[in-house]
Image: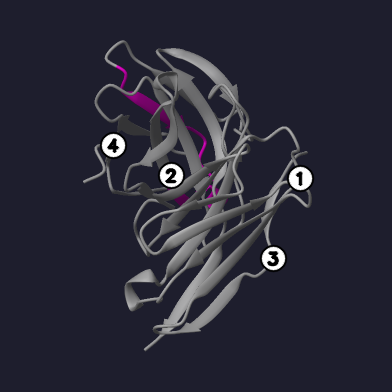
């Protein structure tokens, strides 16, 4: 157990639908990052939050949005889903503010859009 | 934009031999580099990191080498074991931590028993 919790582990939904992925960072970590990984592909950065505020944005589609709540958990919302959105979605947290720049990843949510 | 890439997508190594996984980066402002291991169905796992003021760092059976002159990073795994079979990603980031970590495309390491 890495300390980063992601739910659900698997999600199957139809095109056009909306889903919410949830992430609880490792205890004490203020930064949360979301990544998308398509089949046999690398990790594509989506968005970063620090202590509730958006800090950096990557190649995140307008159909996607995220937020980080006061208790530091984060949610990634994916709407108007398309087949191409099927992927593994990873959340990671870090304690860069305490000098630890390494990421701790959760086990991911596998999204299948049918 | 800036990118971090890997030279070889797949590497097959005999069990017991040493493995070397290479990575090129293009952002000269990067000052922190990380190697991650991702086993099938799992999230990436931190292996080892190195700062730009170093050229070598050793861990348990792993060594990371950094050549800033040619913007090259490598991960050496000694006495490769079947459990080392995974996809390895290099990653880079700038200072401050606000900046996102950019991952390379990954190299799949296959250990032949």
Task: Residue A87: say if magenta.
Answer: yes
Closer to the N terminus: mark 1 or mark 3?
3
- Residue of label 4: A4
- Residue of label 3: B7
- Residue of label 2: A89
Asked if the residues shown at circle 1 and circle 2 are in contact, with their CB atoms under 8 angstroms apart, the answer is: no
Crowding near the residue tagged with mark 1, few <14, some 14–19, many ≥20 C-alpha atoms within 10 Å: some
Query: Which secondary structure, mark 1?
Result: loop
Asked if the residues shown at circle 4 and circle 2 are in contact, with their CB atoms under 8 angstroms apart, the answer is: no
Task: Residue A21: say if magenta.
Answer: no
**Range of the magenta residues?**
A72-88
Tell me the CA gap for discs 3 and 2: 25 Å
In the rendered image of this protein, does residue B100 appear above or below residue B92?
Answer: above
Provide residue A85's location: percent of width, then percent of height.
52, 47
Q: Quadrant of residue B51?
A: top right
Provide residue A92's location: percent of width, then percent of height.
40, 36
Q: Nearer the viewer, mark 1 or mark 4?
A: 1
Crowding near the residue tagged with mark 2, few <14, some 14–19, many ≥20 C-alpha atoms within 10 Å: many
Residue at x-position 56% and y-position 36%: B101
Q: Nearer the viewer, mark 1 or mark 2?
A: 1
Residue at x-position 63% and y-position 63%: B22
- Residue of label 1: B26
Query: Which secondary structure, mark 4?
Result: loop
Residue at x-position 57% and y-position 66%: B21
């Amino acid at each position: 157990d890495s300390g980063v919790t992601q739910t659900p582990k698997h999600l199957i939904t139809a095109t056009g639908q909306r889903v919410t992925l949830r992430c609880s960072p490792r205890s004490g970590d203020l930064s949360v990052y979301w990544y998308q990984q398509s089949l046999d592909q690398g990790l594509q950065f989506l968005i970063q939050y620090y202590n509730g505020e958006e800090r950096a944005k990557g190649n995140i589609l307008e159909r996607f949005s995220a937020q980080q709540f006061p208790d530091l958990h984060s949610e990634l919302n994916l709407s108007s889903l398309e087949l191409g959105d099927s992927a593994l979605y990873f959340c990671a947290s870090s304690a860069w503010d305490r000098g630890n720049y390494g990421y701790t990843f959760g086990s991911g949510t596998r999204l299948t859009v049918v | 934009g800036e990118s971090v890439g890997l030279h070889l997508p797949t590497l097959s190594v005999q069990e017991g031999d040493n493995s070397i996984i290479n990575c090129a980066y293009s952002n000269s402002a990067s000052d922190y580099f990380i190697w991650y291991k991702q086993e099938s169905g799992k999230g990436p796992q931190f292996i080892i990191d190195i700062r730009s003021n170093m050229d070598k760092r050793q861990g348990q059976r792993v060594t990371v080498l950094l050549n800033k002159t040619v913007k090259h990073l490598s991960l050496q795994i000694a006495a490769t074991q079947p459990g080392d079979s995974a996809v390895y990603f290099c990653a880079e980031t700038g200072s401050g931590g606000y900046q996102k970590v950019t991952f390379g495309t990954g190299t799949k390491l296959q250990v032949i028993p």
